[in-house]
Amino acid sequence: MHKLKNNFFFFFFFFFTPILILIFFSSINVLVFAGVKEDPFTPKASLIRYWNKQISNGLPKPSFLIEKASPLTVVQSVAFSKLAGNQNELAGKLPEFCSAANLLCFPDVGPSLEKHSGDVNFKEYAEKNFTNYGSGHLGGFDSFKNYSNDGNSALNSFRRYSRDSVGHGDKFATYARNTNVPDQSFNTYGTKATGGNGDFNGFAEDVNVPNMRFTSYSDNVNGREQTFTSYSVNANAGDQRFTSYGKNVNGAVNGFKSYGNNSNVIGSSFSGYGENGNGANGSFTSYGENGNVPQNNFKSYDDNGNAAVNSFTSYRDQSNVGDDTFKSYAKSSNGAIEKFNNYGNLFNEGTDTFSGYGGGTVNNQKFGFKGYGVNNTFKDYADKKRASFATYAARATAAEMAAMKMKAASGKPVNKWIEPGKFFRESLLRSGTIMPMPDIRDKMPERSFLPRVILSKLPFSSSKIADLQKIFHAEDTNSSMYRFIANSLSECERKPSAGESKRCVGSVEDMIDFATSVLGRDVVVRTINTNRSGKSVKVGPIKKINGGKITKSVSCHQSLFPYLLYYCHSVPKVRVYEADLLDPNTGSKINHGVAICHIDTSAWSPTHGAFLSLGSGPGMIEVCHWIFENDMTWAVAD
């Protein structure tokens, strides 16, 4: 018996002492490691040791980068590392993982069990699933005001909402405004409704990467009116999709006004819109104005309809580039009237393609193009007797092109959409210059890197995207999360351009490895803060990195992904500058900027924003720009 006790004591001491020591050190880090101010076993402490080992110059560590390290504690890091080895287990603990590791994850929004017999007025409401909500309502209206505003994400789903209602109205005002990544789904919304209206006013304004889906929206309705006013204005990237919208309707009216204006790279897709409808009326007014590279796709729009009237007024006017595709549009529609007035008058030429437009088995259609823009292709177009073309521009004239070149030579911005100060010439980098400071604010969701021990166990490949979908609850291929993952993987796996080295990194250690592999171990990383963003500044004292010699650097730019992910690539033949930025009126210092000047632009696209702004072409000029907030550049230390 005595021997058994000794064996038990030995077993307990041998196996549990290391664990007790770890717990002990972790619990007293404030007392023992107060000078370090960091538990020596955390991911952040591990990063600091790795930095000291890999970077040889002993310069102060950049707080802006160290702070992006994983906030996980020792215990959390060990626990989630174990879970990462079994993706099913990690997927089951996703909310806890995302919260502890500071990741971008969307909540799983289940069906709403709330019952409302009468009209509702929602304010300050978010992340709900309205299923079979408002069905069969008679008269009245539901109001959604200040819904999901000012957040990081807005995930809401409206399924079978207002179905079979009569004379019922739905009003969405200032919905998802100032939200970073709104994801809204309207599925079979207002189906078989009679009368009433749906009004979206100030919907998804000033957002980043919106993902709006309207599927089978207002199908089989009778006399219902839908209006979209100030929809996705000032938005950045993202897509709007209308699938089987307004199908089999009778006398429906749909109005899009100030839709997607002043937005950057917004895509809209209308598939099966108004198909087999009777007396449908659609108007697109000030749609996509002053945008940058808008993409719109109309497929099987108003096909087989009767007496449809659609008008496009000031559509995509004064936008930069952009493309619209009309495929099988209004085909075999009876008595269709389609009007394009002041459509596609781009500041910089884009492309419009009309394929299988009009035609079919009927011939009483009318198509009018008045003041229509440049560079358009008509294939399998309806009988020309049905169409009228007034003041239609085939392409910019030689005189117009000459005028643009003269304006470029004057040094003034050529393209008004490109933000002033976003690109500039190297000659402006001298003390005393007053220049506009572009909006350099970081508009990405706040996230942290993952520890290497966890990152190494997670898949990162398009061939493993199904595993990533499962882990991050992105099984819906129409969801924002799926699109973020798929797009980032595609960009990371893209073949490098000539002379480029690239790598996507999900940890600071990986970023250090890539930067030092290109530049050596004596390196410095720099970024900028956002003071005075969007206002004019006066350039103060300037420091030329590496003595102003042409060198190479490593630039790292954020990608949208659940954890913090950077696309890093080598940038050859650049000059790097640091400059104090002063208030033009008082001369006081308000910021410290980092600028990169690309000396060789010969491989850049002719439609690059720098050339659209400065009025030149590949290889003809150098191009400079400021580093944006939380982007960074690595260079050899002076």
Image: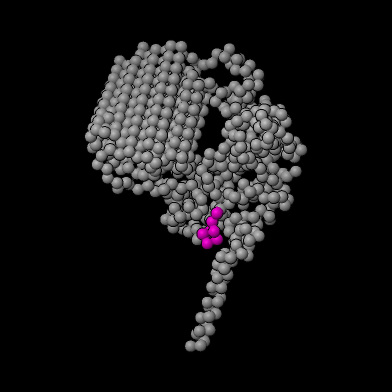
Q: Quadrant of residue 27?
A: bottom right
Residue in the picture at 58% in, 12% down: 399
Tell me where residue 37 sits by quadrant: bottom right
Kindly identify the residue that appears in the image at 43 percent across and 23 percent down: 286
Residue 243 shown in magenta:
no
Instruction: Estimate the x, y position of residue 560 in percent, counting from the top left.
Output: 51, 42
Quadrant, the C terminus = top right
Relative to 274, 519 lies left or right: right
Answer with left or right where residue 120 lies relative to residue 21. Answer: left
- 521 over 178 or under it: above or below: below
Which residue is at the far right?
547
Residue at 63%, 61% in the rendered image? 34
Nearest the eye: 532 or 395: 532
Percent coordinates x, y for residue 58 in the rendering:
72, 52
In the picture as drawn, the residue positioned furthest to the front comes out as 586
Residue 328 lies, with reference to residue 531, above or below; the image says above
Q: Is residue 412 above or below residue 178?
A: above
Tell me: 236 left or right of 62.
Answer: left
Q: Is residue 510 shown to the viewer in this render? A: no
The region drawn magenta spans 71-77
Residue 82 location in percent, x, y?
A: 50, 60
Please tell me which residue lies in front, 183 or 388: 183
The answer to whether residue 633 is visible is yes
Q: Is residue 254 above or below residue 391?
A: below
* Labels in figure, total: 0
Q: How is the image coloured?
A: one colour
Seen as rendered, the residue at the extreme bottom is: 1
Q: Nearer the viewer, residue 491 or 152?
A: 152
- Residue 475 at what x, y percent from top left? 41, 46
Q: Residue at x 65, y 36 (%)?
A: 590
